[in-house]
Image: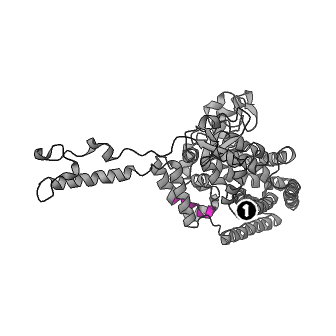
Amino acid sequence: MGSSQDNCVMISQEQLSNSLASGKHWIAIDGSVYDISCWCQAHPGGKLVLLHSAGRDVSEAFEAYHPHWVRQQLAAFKVGQLDSEPLHSYPATADQHPSRLPQCASPASQDNEPFHDVPSASSSPNAHDRKAGVQMIDREAQQSRQPKLTAADRLKSVQNALLAQGLFHTSTAFYIRLAACCAACLAWSIWCILQQHVVPGALLLGLFWQQVAFVGHDAGHNAVTHSSKYDGYIGLVVNACIGIGPSWWKATHNVHHLVVNSLDCDPDIQFMPLLAISPRFFKPVFSRYHNAVLHFDAAASRLIPYQHFTFIPLLMVAKYGLYLQSMKQLMQGRCYINRPWETCTQIVFFAWNGVLLGCVQGWVPRLQLLLISHAAFFVLHLQICLSHFSQPTFEGLPEEDQDWVTTQVSGTMNWSCPVWLDWFHGGLQFQIEHHLFPALPRHNLRKASLLVQPLCRDLGLHYHSPSFFGVSSSSSLL
């Protein structure tokens, strides 16, 4: 692979689409075709992400998730060039279609003479109209020679504008202040618990977990240091604080971003038999993530009719499920950072929380601390779920002719909030911008929205950004 002969091989769109059926994992990026079959197991974003991408043009997705230096590694996987129709068409100009010329000449001049031989302004009262017509045709011809911008072109122009404004640069001061606030929140929580003020201590502990989880989300997207190594270290620290493993997060979240709101591919909307966000779940759905059939069984038939009552209570206990999934990933799945270190940080979390519970006098107050702190964490789950659950869903992979921008915007929704409340949402209030530019630091998402809104308007996409009450009312689960 990667030889000069490979670079000259022309691969048709049909060959690309059928590559997976023939046992090959080919993808197209900016007109080049790459065989990533041997890279699937080692891919930092997970194998399933590449399997869902096989046989497709993933130029926009690649650009969104990879730093520029990764392109230098692609040459080793190249097998040829994509033989496809030109992206841009150039309509015929006026000189190719004389019939488009304005018929404004006087009867005396309507002969077989060329158009440029018309009388001058001093000799014909209609010359001004002729001149204006020629100028109009010239403008139209000039515009027609401009290639029609695709959604990918427009997205790239927005990305270039973000780069020019320095919005992909992380503010160190922002994260220093955030770390100080989280430390103060934890210290206040511990003080309250030591003073046996269990309820306020539990609420503060839940707030601490929520805010640190946002940092883990940033680090998982390499949006803090923009280095997978150092952001991985941050992920380990986050794991020690909240007990949610970075390996489990990467395994599910990267797939979620690629196929957002796909009923059978997106693990973040598959909660049978507890919740069904689409009537399609009333029939069996094969989950490509869990590699199992999601049945509408007896349990689902009893629980789903009441999901608008059970939704919030389920979110209040959801963190316990994340512990189990994180440990299952550590024991049975792939570890994306370092298995011993991730195991140690998981143990550290349960250790310091066990000590904290031991500082509370009496079993009832201890139970209060345990339940209330985890229930307070429901806000994070609510912020995530409502940003996607009320949006359209689909089955399988996105249509091959559907652009990346449409896929991401149609599956996400923002939360409109004042600037002073941005800290509380941790960047999740700008889900549209985040899904288009995952590596963009969250403190710059609001500025990015000023460029994304015109992008959506130009492409005819609905930029959905209701208030909290508007988000809540749009969800069938509330």
User: Chief secondary structure of the magenta span?
Assistant: helix
Which image quarter: residue 421? bottom right
Q: Is residue 394 above or below residue 175?
A: above
Q: Quadrant of the C terminus?
A: top right
Which image quarter: residue 313? top right
Q: Is residue 109 left or right of residue 444?
A: left
Count residues near mark 1 (Cα–Cα under 10 Å), then give few for <14, some for 14-19, many for 20+.
Answer: some
Q: Residue 393: x, y in percent? A: 59, 38
Task: Tell me how the rendering is colored.
Answer: one colour
What segment is highlighted magenta in the picture?
440-449
Q: Nearer the viewer, residue 21 or 280?
A: 21
Q: Residue 243: x, y in percent? A: 80, 54
Q: Residue 140: x, y in percent? A: 33, 50
Task: Tell me the kind of residue under disc 1.
Answer: Ser
Whether the magenta-drawn stretch holds residue 442 is answered as yes
Q: Is residue 157 left or right of residue 213?
A: left
The residue that appears at 76% across and 34% down in the rendered structure is: 291
The residue labelled by disc 1 is 227
Whether the magenta-drawn stretch holds residue 352 is answered as no
The residue that appears at 70% across and 28% down in the rendered structure is: 296
**Residue 429 seen in render:** yes
SS for dot 1: loop
The residue that appears at 73% across and 66% down in the rendered structure is: 182
Q: Is residue 61 above or below residue 166?
A: above
Q: Residue 127: x, y in percent? A: 16, 54
**Residue 466 seen in render:** no
